[in-house]
Image (cartoon, rainbow, N blue to C red):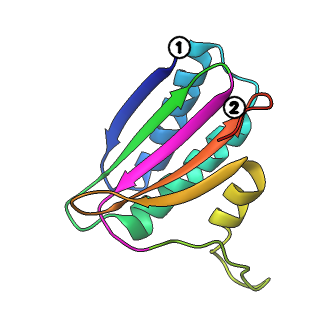
């Protein structure tokens, strides 16, 4: 059985913490807390990217979380096209590490087009030998 929760957030800095709390509540409610810290951190990074880079003015983002016994999948739907990529920032850069963290913590991540506009940035977390 797959559990699913989703919520729309406005494009405000406070939405990042609200998205993290929403993910935490969902995982605890489903009893799927084994990778909760990794999921929360990745939600923070993906939500931050949506707020800073991914949403057109006047739009927000959708956070969707799906979980079954083997995989938790996090999706952030936003309104701008473009393919975010993990990069290696210089030691003095104040930002640019978010997708590096997602790549390090998640068992998989990627970007898909969302029609008619926008994209979905996803990450997944395995509980066992499942594939994402």
Left or right: 62 as drawn, with respect to 19: left
Disc 2 or 1, which lies upstream in sequence? Answer: 1
Q: How many marks?
A: 2
The magenta region covers 70-82
State the image coordinates of residue 113 (x, y, percent, origin top left).
Answer: 37, 61
- Where 28 falls versus 89 (above or below)? above
- Where 97 falls versus 69 (above or below)? below
Nearer to us of marks 2 and 1 is 1
Q: Which residue is mark 2?
A: 36
Identified at 52% across, 23% down, the residue is 26
Q: Quadrant of the C terminus?
A: top right
Q: Which residue is mark 1?
A: 1
In this view, the residue in front, 3 or 50, is 3
Identified at 47% across, 45% down, the residue is 75
Left or right: 7 as drawn, with respect to 102: left
* Residue 80, quarter of picture: bottom left
In this view, the residue in front, 91 or 111, is 111
State the image coordinates of residue 61 (x, y, percent, origin top left).
Answer: 34, 51
Q: Secondary structure at mark 1?
A: loop
Number of other residues with Cα within 10 Å of mark 1, as a class: few under 14, some 14 to 19, many 20 or more:
few
Q: Secondary structure at mark 2?
A: helix
Q: Quick check: is 81 in the magenta stretch?
A: yes
Q: Main secondary structure of the magenta part?
A: strand
Left or right: 96 as drawn, with respect to 20: right
Number of other residues with Cα within 10 Å of mark 2, as a class: few under 14, some 14 to 19, many 20 or more:
some
């Amino acid at each position: 059985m797959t559990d699913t929760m989703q919520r729309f957030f406005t494009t405000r800095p406070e939405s990042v913490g609200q998205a993290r709390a929403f993910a935490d509540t969902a995982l605890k409610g489903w009893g799927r807390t084994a990778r909760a810290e990794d999921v929360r951190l990745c939600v923070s990074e993906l939500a931050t990217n949506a707020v800073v880079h991914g949403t057109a003015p006047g739009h927000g983002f959708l956070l969707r979380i799906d979980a079954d016994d083997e995989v938790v999948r996090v999706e952030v739907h936003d309104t701008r096209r473009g393919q975010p990529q993990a990069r290696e920032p210089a030691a003095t850069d104040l930002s640019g590490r978010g997708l590096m963290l997602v790549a390090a913590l998640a068992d998989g991540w990627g970007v898909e087009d969302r029609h008619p506009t926008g994209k979905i940035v996803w990450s997944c977390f395995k509980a066992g030998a499942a594939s994402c």
